Amino acid sequence: MFLTNWFYTEPEPYMYVIFCLAVILFVSKSLGILARRIGLPQVVGQVIAGLLIGPAFFVGLDNFHGILNPNAEEMDILHVFSQIGVIFILFSSGLDTNVKEMKKAGGIATLVACCGVLIPLALGFVIAMCFMPGGFSSITNTDAVFNALFVGAILTATSVGITVETLRELGKLNSKVGTIVLGAAIIDDVLGILVLSLITSLKGGEIPLYITILKVILFFVFAIGVGILARMIFKWLGKHYPHHRRTGIYAIALCFVFSFVAEQVFGVAAITGAYMAGLMLSGIDDTEYINKKIISSGYLIFSPLFFAYIGISADFSHFEPFDLVFALCFVVVGIIGKIIGCGLAAKTAKQNMRDSYIIGSGMIARGEVALAVYASGSMLIWRDASGALLGIDPMIGTICLILLSSILCPILLKLGFKNYPNLEEITGEPFTPKLAKEGQAPYIDENK
């Protein structure tokens, strides 16, 4: 005991976080490599790693709560790291976006996003009403109806970070379907926020719907206006100081500013701001240099933390049989709603069956936006005057949906792209992915 006290003292919060980072990076990367070896995308292994090293599966044990069991303060720090990871993923995706292809896919992406919001919203409403006290007879109760609409609103969100990372790993981010999925996912997040704002406004929320719509419009005006100015500056930097480290640093600063302003000023998701920042810097002379720096910075530390954090943050301690049944139905409806809604929209837009399946599968992943929607709309849950729960609290279902969809999305995309023709097979011309050296090489080298 004396030697234990002598050699080991209770760590400060930041020191325990450093230990957490070491464990997360080692285990997530190891399981990521294992996932690649058995034919799955690395993100599947990284999400599973978070489940295995966190407290999710060990909540019933008295003396063991997982390899990592961070407290609330330490989880907040890890959450910040994970958010930087997803911001880097979206910024890199913006840099890698072909603006001309995005314009071509804009109409299809908008249609896919709209159907990917409306159909899950409707299915979520129906399934929630089925679990309300008295079933559908409670549809005459205003509180029950708004509770059910809130459940449906959670299903509208799409986690673009997981989908983008999978598409990048498969080398399909710049493909036609990859561009459609990326554009639809960005639009999807904005529409999801508007849907929640509409529901809370009708319920008597503090912010009127027209204010929310105005703020979204103003954000894109800001992003395009400031982005054009930033683009001119970075073009000048690229001309006079090509491939200088300062360019990458300034680009990351711009990304963080856009992310902050998007969420804190305009009420739009930070990841949308990061994507817009990358989009405004795409296609300039130093774009690939900047993207290489982002990939080096993000994929070394922050991006694996984002995927592992999904598993670590899972909490199954409050599972009740009723919650489990609802959670399973919630997950099934959430996945089917996206595949059917987005897939049918793509088919309506004259995409073939395989592309429609890929687009639908690429939209099923849920993540930080779903949790943000839950946190923002939790006041819509039906409770009595004392605060006792009367309706449906979808927290556990939301966590299950995030976990299962995060694992299923890469698997379904992998199956969809099996034997998928490359651009070279379609055009007959040699084709090398734009980011083959920067974006794809790390995955190849890591398997050695």
Image (cartoon, rainbow, N blue to C red):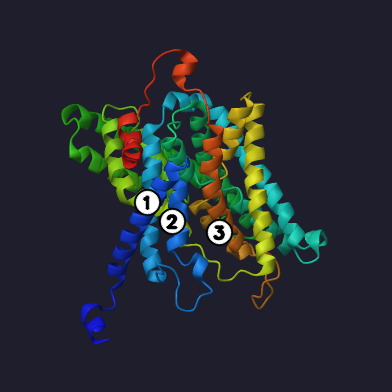
Residue 434 in the image: state x and y as whole percent: 35, 27
Relative to 432, does residue 292 appear above or below in the rendering? Answer: below
Rendered image quadrant of residue 348: top right
Three-letter code, disc 1? Ser
Chain-order first, disc 3 or disc 2: 2
Q: Which mark is residue 10?
A: none
For the residues bearing labels 3 and 2, Cβ distance under 8 angstroms? no
Q: Residues within 10 Å of mark 3 (few under 14, many from 20)?
A: many
Amino acid type, mark 2:
Ala
What is the quadrant of the N terminus in the image?
bottom left
Element at badge 3?
Answer: helix
Between disc 1 and disc 3, the foreground one is 1
Q: Are marks 1 and 3 in contact (CB under 8 Å)?
A: no
Instruction: Tell me: 133 left or right of 257.
Output: right
Q: Quadrant of residue 436?
A: top left
Q: What separation in Å lies between label 1 and label 2 (alpha carbons)? A: 9 Å
Image quarter of residue 349: top right
Measuring 38% from the left and 26% from the top, which residue is drawn there? 433
- Residue named by callout 1: 30
Label 1–label 2 contact, CB within 8 A: yes
Task: Look at mark 3 in the image and give the residue it sits on.
Answer: 399
Compute the Cα span from label 3 to label 2.
Answer: 16 Å
Relative to the observer, which residue lies in front, 161 or 315? 315
Give the position of the C terminus as an image quadrant. top left
Instruction: Report the residue at 69% width, 61% height from top.
Output: 325
- In this figure, which residue is indicated by the disc labeled 2? 49
Q: Residue at x 60, y 37 (%)?
A: 360
Whether residue 386 is visible to the viewer of this picture, yes or no, is yes
- Residue type indicated by callout 3: Ile
Answer few, some or many: residues within 10 Å of disc 1's Cα (few below 14, many 20 plus, some between 14 and 19). some
Q: Is residue 226 left or right of residue 184?
A: left
Asked if residue 97 lies left or right of residue 106, the reply is left
